[in-house]
Amino acid sequence: MRGSMPPKAHGYFPLILVLYEMANYLSNDAYLPALPSIAQEFGVSNHLVQLTLTTFFLGNATMQLILGPVSERYGRRPVLLYGGVVFVLSTFVCAFTQSIAMMLVARFIQGAAVTSMLIAGYGTIHALYDQAHAIKTLAWMSSITVLAPALGPLLGSFILLVASWRWIFIILAIWAMLLLCMLYKFTPETAERQASMHPIHIMKQYGAVLSDWKFAQPVLVMSFLFGAMIAWIAAGPFLVMENFHYSAQVFGYMQAIVFGSFIVGTYCVRFLMEKIGLFKLVRISLSLAFAGGALSIIFSFILPGHLFDIIAPLAILSLGSGIGFPIMNRLAIEANEQPMGIKMAVFASAMAFSALAGSAVISSFYDGKIISFAVILIIFGALALAFGYSIKITEQPKT
């Protein structure tokens, strides 16, 4: 992958994209404190309301493999913009729906629409920049997008103090609509639009990517780290507010601690990659992730019944994830010379299925006790360490 510095006219694109991405992610994170309220209003169980998270990730997993080749054939810019329109409309449906069934459908469509941002938006970033600049750009973008899970629940809880949960979705729809107008002006077209849409040709390209271990290894590592973070997002509201009987605001503060650690990790990448190199940073990332899972098990026995025994290990795991995410992202894209859209589609699909797995594991195996959640964390952390510790890295010179 040979990117370069983008023209000055497109220098605003990464910032606008990341602000739009926040609206996408806040559609998950800001409404977390409202899950009990939604369950009460619709007269359904907590388990059914948790499925609004699962259906979002399921929708996210359905469109990846389609939009990948479409973005290469018809352009990344139209895929990003048309997907944004669908996201805005489905968010308004979430705001005004009168049934849990319709909300589940709208959440599925929301998740499918987010695919356009992941494939077309991030495909454009990778096409614009070389390795070093791409990793630094992905790091600072991650430090902003992670504000969604870090501060989203706190934002949602404050909105709930003065308004209905429906206003969370109304605000996000307006936010996304304004950013979409800016993306219309500043999004460059980086696809050559010469890719064949013949099914056999596309299947061969996907086969070449899926069979490439150099691509699969960083994708698997990132998937396990992401799955652990999603497990916390799915279980956190109920663990903090129902098990420990804290307020939605306290959950927001705990979320800020966990994802604030992720932000620290992204800054470590930006300042340390040239001093100690990507190889050592990857080892540090994986070691921290595993240590976080292991400490969650230990603390659940030493300090049973204390919120600290899960928040502190989570912060360590999150720190490691913040270091690993931007590096693994770029390493996967550089793995082979297949079209960007194909690689981004497989990468985004893996993230979607890991998110789906993280939320599904919580729905199936989390029994409300900290020890069960700690076991889930250490499994994800151990898998990331096992698959990533032998990863090989070729650092490219700056261009």
Image (cartoon, rainbow, N blue to C red):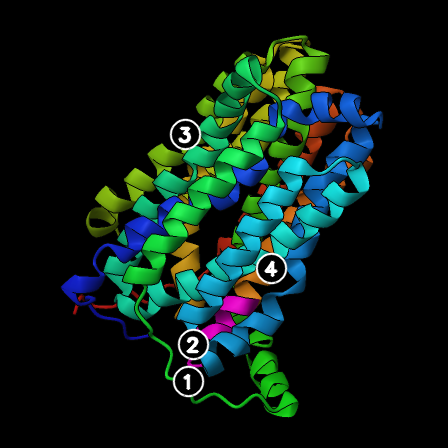
Q: Does 117 sit left or right of 371 as displayed?
A: left
**Distance between mark 2 and mark 3 Cα atoms:** 36 Å
| Residue under the point 69% across and 26% down | 35
Q: Who is closer to the viewer here, 275 or 329?
A: 329
Mark number displayed over residue 261: 3
Cα gap from disc 1 to disc 3, whole angstroms: 40 Å
| Marks 1/4: CA–CA distance | 25 Å
Can you give x and y, in whole percent of width and height, for residue 170 in the image? 54, 35
Image coords of residue 306 (percent x, y): 62, 9
In the picture, residue 244 is in which quadrant?
Answer: top right
- Dot 1 amino acid type: Arg
User: Where does the image place residue 329, in percent across and percent down from the top left?
Assistant: 43, 58
Task: Indicate which label's residue lies in the foreground, 4 or 2.
Answer: 2
Q: Which residue is mark 2?
A: 75
Find the distance from the CA under tag 3 to the CA under tag 4: 24 Å
Ranked by sequence position, the earlier of labels 3 and 4 is 3
User: Could you tell me if the residues under marks 3 and 4 are in contact, i.e. CB atoms within 8 Å?
Assistant: no
Disc number at residue 193?
Answer: 1
The mark nearer the N terminus, 4 or 2, is 2
Q: Is residue 159 left or right of residue 380?
A: left
Q: Which residue is mark 4?
A: 350
